[in-house]
Image (cartoon, grey):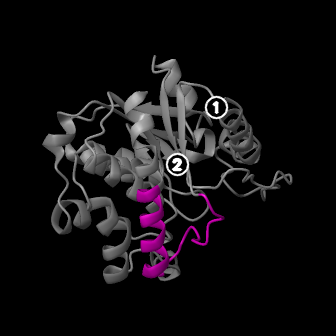
Amino acid sequence: MRGTFTAGVLDCFLDNGISFPYTIGVSAGASNGLSYASKQRGRARACNIDALVKYKYVGYRHLLKSGNLMDYDFMFSELPCKIYPYDFEAYRNSGRFVIGATNCVTGEMEYFEKQPDMQSLLNVCKASCSLPYICPTVEVGGVPMLDGGIVDSIPICRARKDGFVKNVVVLTRNRGYRKSEKKLRLPWFVYRKYPKLREALVARNSNYNKILEKIEEIEGDAGIIVIRPQKKLEVGRMEMNPVKLDKLYNEGYDCALQAVEKIRAL
């Protein structure tokens, strides 16, 4: 739900006619980014706040019922197909849009570009959003996948590898934030079929902190603009309070608005 900040940023971009030839996102960044790719202004906010309040699609009751903290049948079927229909044709006609997910077998990131149909797109997004421990794996092309944030939560290196050296980076944490690097000890039975995934989970926080340090190091360069919350976040990953979520959305919008002219100059 911290991705609601990103929803505000992207709506600001749409309101100001800002588009990019290349967009990449993982986890909540991927799901919010899809509404941006299809130019459906307000859709991400409606999914993150309005639908959450009305349908309560995140919660421990889902975990007890289906082994998943999120109601995937609702999130990746009813929500994009009926309640807030996703404009797949607009997505197909947009620029490059890349979604990252973690391959459970190799423990490495895989990047997916344009999908041939709506179901394939939703499945890749579902894989990217599947948090470890509290969501089941999602098969993409017969391969079990999980949250893209396990390996590459801020994929600026991939964007540059793909040839895009001028970057606008949207973060959901304030400057200076770091994850704890206390060594993670996974019980032997957790993902025992996927030893490479276990290694990736152990290294996750350290790798995340390294890329944050890299971003802060190059932030003053002419070719990068970073948009992030200015204050310490008060919204948790599973936040259900619509007032807090709306405040975070508005903060994202305002932070992006302050960067509009810089982005145009870039």
Label 1: state its secondary structure: loop
Question: What residue is shown at x 16% (from left), y 66% (from top)?
Answer: 82
First to last magenta residue range = 230-254
On screen, residue 42 above or below 10 = below
Judging depth in this view, the residue of 254 and 71 nearest the camera is: 254
Question: What residue is shown at x 28% (from left), y 32% (from top)?
Answer: 114
Label 2: state its secondary structure: strand
Residue 178 image offset from top left, x and y in percent: 75, 52
Q: Are marks 2 and 1 in contact (CB under 8 Å)?
A: no
Residue type highlighted by circle 2: Leu
Q: Residue furthest top?
A: 163
Q: Do we see residue 216 in this rendering? A: yes
Horizontal arrangement in the rendering, residue 83 relative to residue 168 (left or right): left
Residue type highlighted by circle 1: Gly
Residue 258 image offset from top left, x and y in percent: 45, 49
Q: Looking at the image, is mark 2 or mark 1 earlier in the sequence? A: 2
Residue 85 image offset from top left, x and y in percent: 17, 59
Please rate how many residues cluster around mark 1, counting C-alpha atoms within 10 Å: few if below 14, some from 14 to 19, many from 20.
few
Please rate how many residues cluster around mark 2, counting C-alpha atoms within 10 Å: few if below 14, some from 14 to 19, many from 20.
many
On screen, residue 23 above or below 244 = above
Instruction: Look at discs 2 and 1 and give the one toward the viewer.
Output: 1
Question: What residue is shown at x 59% (from left), y 38% (from top)?
Answer: 152
Q: Which residue is mark 2?
A: 146
CA distance separating discs 2 and 1:
33 Å
* The label number, if any, that marks residue 220 in the structure image: 1
Horizontal arrangement in the rendering, residue 214 relative to residue 85 (left or right): right
Residue 168 image offset from top left, x and y in percent: 48, 36
Horizontal arrangement in the rendering, residue 165 relative to residue 78 (left or right): right
Is residue 147 a member of the stretch shown in magenta? no
